Image (spheres, rainbow, N blue to C red):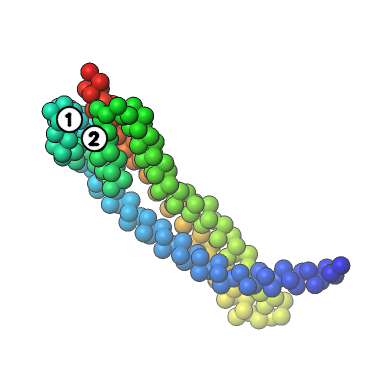
Amino acid sequence: MLPLASIENVVFHVSNVLRTPVLIVALVAVALVVVECGALGVELVRRGRRNPDRLQNAATHAREAIVEGDRASAAKYLGIAVSSAAMWKAVLRVVALTGLPEASIRVPKTIADFDIGSLRRLERTRVLVRVGPALGLMGTLIPLSPALSGLASGKVDQLTSNLRVAFSVTVLGLLVGAVAFGISLVRDRLYAQDLSDLTFIAATLEGEASA
């Protein structure tokens, strides 16, 4: 059985080995949050043109076009309702399926797949909400050991350097978690609205097809 001192040394060295990877991952997390902020800005701009009345009129014109057998025009009318490439793909599939015998099964499946895709996109920032503070905590605790060693041996420079790293990583971790949480909240609302619009489009088209 290993003595306690040997086990503590192993834990200490493992912790020190993790120092550089934790710092690198923390910087990557910050970069990802910046990218997600930019992506959210694009999504907000695309949804700025959304208008419930225009959506209803577009769905009505698309329904009439499908009745006349002109699915291309139907897709064109619904273009104003599209806020993302994923939604456009789902709308095209709904238009193609409307009026077919298997539409009652495949259209709901298309909508469900779209919802799952939205959840998958949300997972990117939801993971950062948890990972950010965790990285901040790890990046704080790991440098504390050499900082305390420096304090015990009277090495003020070693103490100062390690404490600076520890507190800096804490700030970065909390920043990543807070910003990612805000992005997740906004996207949750946006994607719920997209799902509502897609469901409305499908119901409007299918209502005429079944009439």
Q: Position of residue 113 (x, y in %)?
A: 39, 39
The picture places residue 172, in percent across and down from the top left corner, at: 48, 62
Nearer to us in this view, 2 or 97: 97
State the residue at coordinates (43%, 47%). 120
- Give x and y (percent) for residue 143: 62, 70
- Residue carrying label 2: 95
- At mark 2, the secondary structure is helix
Task: Give the vertical position of 57 relative to 7 (above or below).
Answer: above
Q: Is residue 200 above or below residue 2?
A: above
Name the residue type under label 2. Answer: Val
Image coordinates of residue 166 in percent, x first then y, are 57, 67
Q: Quadrant of residue 8?
A: bottom right
User: For the residues marked 2 and 1, what is the alpha-carbon distance in whole angstroms?
Assistant: 8 Å
Quadrant for the C terminus, please.
top left
CB atoms at circles 2 and 1 under 8 Å apart? yes
178 sits left or right of 167 in the view = left
Q: Is residue 151 visible?
A: no
Residue receiving disc 1: 66
In the structure shown, which secondary structural element does the residue marked by tag 1 occupy? helix
Query: Which residue is found at the position 28% from the left and 44% from the top?
Result: 89
User: In the rendered structure, which amino acid carries the disc numbered 1?
Assistant: Ile
- In the picture, measured across the screen, residue 12 lies left or right of residue 138, that is right
In this rendering, the count of numbered labels is 2
